[in-house]
Amino acid sequence: MIEFTINGQATSLDADPNMPILWIVREKLGMTGTKFGCGIAACGACTVHLDGEPVRSCSTPLSAAEGRAITTIEGVAGEDGALSAVQQAWISEQVPQCGYCQSGQIMSATALLRDNPEPSDEDIDAAMSGNICRCGTYKRIRQAIKVAAGLETAQSEDEAQESAA
Amino acid sequence: MSEQETAKPTAKTERSAAAKWSRRGFIGAGVLAGGALLIGVGVRPGNPVGKLKAKVAGGAGEELVNSWVKVGADNVVTAIIPHCEMGQGAHSVLAQMLADELDADWSKVEVMQAPADGSYIVSDAARMFVAPFTMNAADWIEPTWDGLFTQIGRLADVMITGGSSSIRTTGQYQMRIAGAAARKMLIGAAADEWGVPTSEITTRNSTLIHSGSGKSAPYSDFAAAAANQPMDSSPALKDPKDYRLMGKSKRRTDIPAKVMGKADFGIDANIPGVELSDLSYAAVRRAPVPGTKVTSMDAEAAKDMPGVQQILNMGSFIAVVADGYWNAQQALNTITAEYSASESPIKTTADQFAAFRDAIDAAGDDGGEQAASKGDAASAFADAATKLEAEYSAPFLAHAPMEPVNCTAWVRDTDDGAKCDIWTSTQVPLMARSAAAGALGMDDEDVTVHHPFLGGAFGRRLENDYVTMAVRVAKATGYPIKMIWSREEDTQKALYRPADVSRFKGGLDAGGRLVAYNNIFTQRHDPAEASVPGIYDIANTSVRVAEAPLHLPFSAWRSVDHSQQGFFIESFIDEAANAAGADPLEYRLSMLGANTARHKGVLEKVAEISNWSTPRGEGIGLGVAIIESFGTVGAEVIEVDMTSGRPKMLNVWAAMDAGYVMNPDGFRNQIEGGIVFGLTAAMYGEIELEDGAVKQSNFHDYQMLRMDETPAIEVAIINSGTVPIGGAGEPSTSPAAPALANAIFAASGKRLREMPFAKQFA
Amino acid sequence: MRKFIAAITAVSALSLAGCSGSEVQEPVEQIVVAEPGKAASATSGETGPEQIAEPEQPAE
């Protein structure tokens, strides 16, 4: 039995301690918001927090979670369902395209802003370059991080409507 | 909208169509409880696909009715979207288009993915795409003609998302008509009830209004009666000045779920009645060289691995089925196998490029297939004041969507015969159904395809190789399996953007004008015009294709042929500008041919927003490229800093003319993403061959552009009013590589003729 | 454009041919190590229910 908390919930599981947290979360706990991308910690799609620190769950064994707290994308919003500042910024800046990598992006960005509430562009590069977005939404991710940090103003739906030359 | 036939679906066909959806759970499934009604709208029943379907289906009227909109008792309008959502925003924007013509209240509009059903063929996309199938087959494809014709027979079921086509075809010619026709039917029903002329009824925010009598009613009050109204299949559409939703940056409907981790992709498939923890998972390994088979396997160690349920040698691949993906993959990793020998003489990247060059050499000065010809390019070259010769090359590329290839399948016997359900991310749900049915020897009707969001596709999910594999494993096990490819499998055993070599001989006249253009290459797939420098006025042009063997199977990759041809052509034009001593952007303007007002427009716009004429510092250069593709004209300028000796991309400016943009912010997102996709290929994209197999395996050696290398991107939209409108998903990808190569040349004097670029600065 | 879909279709057919020759192909070798248990018992059944995606709504 391995005991840990996931999104605040105490859990104990009889499972292979060597199995990566990614597959425990997705297949054993049925929480599919955390994504499989590469299996070698090279893309960041599987990022979750372990005691608040971002880790690549595809390469982190369940044993590493013993007695610790796992947070997944499903645990980012408040208990009342209110979206976090990062999630709200992801909506206002209309960040996602396919969206597959965005759980991992949001987990990385959330950790960044907790440690560094007003990140510079270099800080954003350093914290986010482990997360690949094949759709290429990096510009919007950067902007949304600044919006979530209060460094930039959120784009309203109306503001986005100016169109043509 | 010329050759419209008038659709007059009767109440009977409307009802029978509704009954059909009812069986499928659209009505009476709870969400629509309380008298909600679906409005069936027959759109363009004269389309050839519809006719073919009618023949196949015995002329049943309901098969000709495509239906896209329903109105609930709560006055919620649901747009049923026939295209897949793979990040391009089609779900939202198609709903915007329908809702605008319907005068629906956007805050009460919902979006629903249409099921994989023949009622939801995208007939206008089909009309644009479906060929008379007289293409000249290359050798590698010839043996498949039998299979192909089987597929063609099933092409009645064209439900395809690709070719940057959703908005400009289905949106313009199906969703808008559906919305406008539904609005007219609602007005007709209200006019009958209120005893007033239809001309006196107006609509606004899902409400019918008769100002003369002061009457008004929500659409839902008349939804049932509207279904009995005659339907106009060519209703008047709104003039752009009357658009309320089209042309506006409404937020996308799929984004909230995607930021909460609640969006379901194919890999998240959940079979009703089966807990995810009880499901079986399959890991697979194909024979490493295309066309080869597994001749034997040693699975002794795998049998004892935890969770393993079955080990299968399927001929062309090995599958391990286990109680979880991790256990399946771990067990698969212990299996050793022997494979049949490949008949391909190509073993290495060098072999492949030698085959291209041999074919080009063999074609000589006038061999190969003539793709374009004008004047006398050979003589013009001989007589040219300045001669230019250049050879360019591009490598194989994998699509590498973030969601690895996967498919969940369940094949079983029921009282009603054998049935199959599949859950997968696909751009072609009905072709996936055909592929599954074909592999199982079942009828299409006995296969149900569930297709949630796609975690990227870029052309990879136009293919059904993985669907076939999953259903074969599921057939063998007899219980449902979720097949997931490792990233390594996804990278190495896929279908690829072809590599190619392209040679140019160009000649300038004494004034520096390009007057001779001789070009030969080996790979031509689609679009046919991609290899023709048609926007330029070049007096003598000869474009030829030499046939060469291709070791890896072809598939369409975002922007398809433009992805190589754009680099070849726009690099060569840049070399001509340099030879002429001209400014590259001014040179392009001076070379533009007839009917190029839009091209002039985007070049001037991109010059303006990039401050093109303002000199940059030492070691910093600007490069430009312009390409017309998928109905959109796009010019990009890239600013690159070469002072460190390696390219550092600073800025990208893009000016795009798609005629009219339906959702500017969504369009910008597509253009931005397309640029990053193009720059990724330009800097890093390369699939190499070793011993006949793909060498790269994962993101450590098949690299993507990341946050720290992504330049700032600014997009200008030009709504020139050109119709038909153009696409958004692909047009910005192809100009990125030549603009970057041209910028590197401007900054450093180093002319890059091979993709990718980064390794040339190691 | 037209060749695009033809090419797509052709490749699909090629894939089919490569995997199965467009007819049912049984495994060359099938080793059954264990039964899956609950998943198998849940599978005797009827046509898979149509899975209706959650409707998407504009974000507010």
Image (tube, grey):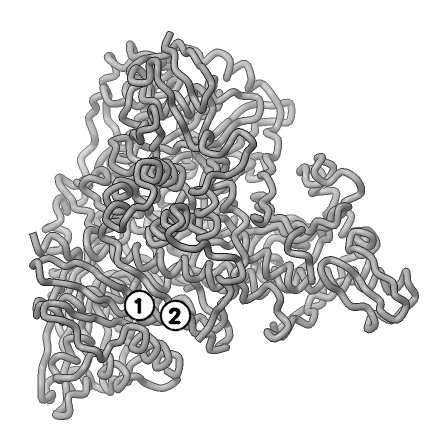
Q: Would you place residue B385 above or below residue B533 in this image?
A: below
Query: Callout 2: few (<14), some (14-19), or many (20+) C-alpha neighbours within 10 Å?
Result: many
Dividing the picture into quadrants, the one containing residue B603 is: bottom left
Q: Position of residue B150 (x, y in %)?
A: 47, 47
Contact, mark 2 vs mark 1 (Cβ under 8 Å): yes
- Give the residue type that dot 2 points to: Ala
Q: Is residue B468 visible?
A: yes
Of residue C1 and residue A76, the one placed in the foreground of this image is A76
Q: Indicate the secondary structure of the residue bearing disc 1.
A: strand
Of residue B93 and residue B534, the one placed in the foreground of this image is B93
Q: How many marks?
A: 2
Q: Which mark is residue B653?
A: 1
Q: Position of residue B751 (x, y in %)?
A: 10, 67
- Give the residue type that dot 1 points to: Trp
Name of the residue lying farthest toward the right: B195
Q: Indicate the secondary structure of the residue bearing disc 2.
A: strand
Q: Position of residue B721 (x, y in %)?
A: 50, 77
